[in-house]
Image (tube, rainbow, N blue to C red):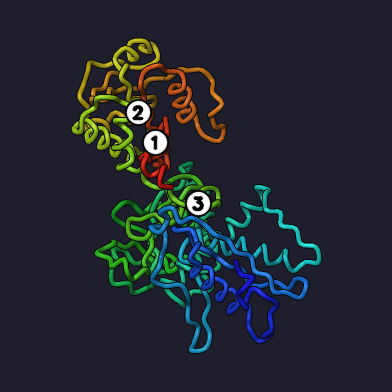
Amino acid sequence: MFQSHPIAQKRQDEALDGRSLSDAIKRVIEQCPSKPMGTKYYVSFPAPQGGYSVCAVLGLQELGVSQFELPAKSKIQLHEFRSFQIPISLVEAAADEFLRNVTEELRKDEPSIQVSSSNHAEGMLRAAGERFVSGVVLRCDETRFEGASGFFNACTTISSLFYERSASKGRILLAGKTHPSLETIIQFATPTDLIAFRAARKLLELSDSELGLFTDSEQISGLVKLGPYDRTREDLFEIEVLDHHHRELRHGNQPLIVVRYGLPSLPRLPFDAEKLAVDLPRIFKGIDASQVINLVSLVEAAEKAPHGTLLIISEAAQSEAMRLRHQGTPIAASQLTPTLLTQLTSVDGAILLSPEGVCYAIGTILDGMATLRGDPGRGARYNSAIRYVDSTTSPCLAVVVSEDRGVNLFPALRPPVSRSMIDRL
């Protein structure tokens, strides 16, 4: 792609620094007419190889992850002549960390990129999480370099501690000391250092859905209440500790990253309601528009189940409820509503309902033959849904809602494409 471009040839201008070169390559890629749509590119710093300056280029499909970005600020200005970049998302931080490893390898006499081991990949991901969260802290207060360097690991430690045998749960609000959206309800006479982990874990018990612990990333100084907040400021964040070694970093009501046992990941994308509305008539022939709308609303309610759930939508729901009656709780036919469904998800097992939204059983343990599509990395709910769908002979859709509120649908139909589009392509 770059052979005809001056920056792709042996560098003539030695004064051109690494950042300028990588930025120039990125601009060339962005202007290339053959560049795939929906792809974002990251370019490493150059490494000398054979008389050339070599940059690695990583292209990632965006795939709707823009909601996990903080686009308002991408650099911190130390003073008039000095600034440094901060990542706008976990994806960008991970891409930068990967390319930094690539550059270090390219500088060796015999480079060999080996990033396939899980330990290496997880190490890069943890480093990316630390760097992204450091940038979050500096968005709140550009002077908090000490807090920024240790905030990620401090939250990991606090979420790992028990208090009187109870797992960690609570809310921490991160902002500058005088943020206008925070109302101080209780001010501690002596702030507690965040790195006093056991004391911080004890104070976490004071927080709830109304009041959160306030921290400037270095100290915990009281309990505050969150008022109206302008999201464009990007200077107030919430850390919700959900369980042992499990927390979310949020901006407004939008999760930015999920951290389990110190390993960060993106939050699960909400299920595609529009695609589900298209898929339902493909699975259940003769289903009408009102029934499609009702089923979509039920799946949306199931997605909010605090401990996850499993819905089996089947044309044979009534007979299956009787067949499986000894490993579940059959009920009289009841038309489900989102509110009623929310109540029913509190028990383990599958909820059996028809395409018309009529429920016939709750708490059902499913059966089915073993299948090659199983995933040992997922739980029993996920794998039992696959076994059941692969074994049943009636039109059926399984909706698996995991505890992190991710939604999987089986069968997972590919998006419909018109024959005219195929012919045109």
The kind of residue on which mark 3 rests is Ser
* Residue ID at (30%, 25%): 284
* Residue ID at (33%, 15%): 321
Q: What element carries label 1?
A: strand
Instruction: Please give the residue where the numbered disc 1 appears in the rendered image.
Output: 401
| Residue 139: percent from left, percent from top | 43, 71
Q: Distance between the residues labelled 1 and 2?
A: 8 Å
Question: Is residue 336 toward the left or the right of residue 111 in the image?
Answer: left
Decide: is 5 above or below 355.
below
Circles 3 and 2 in contact, beta carbons < 8 Å: no
The kind of residue on which mark 2 rests is Leu
Label 2, residues with CA under 10 Å away: few <14, some 14-19, many ≥20:
many
Q: Can residue 161 be seen in the rendering of this structure?
A: no
In the rendered structure, find residue 265 and report the number of the disc placed on it: 3
Circles 3 and 1 in contact, beta carbons < 8 Å: no
Circles 1 and 2 in contact, beta carbons < 8 Å: yes
- The N terminus: image quadrant: bottom right
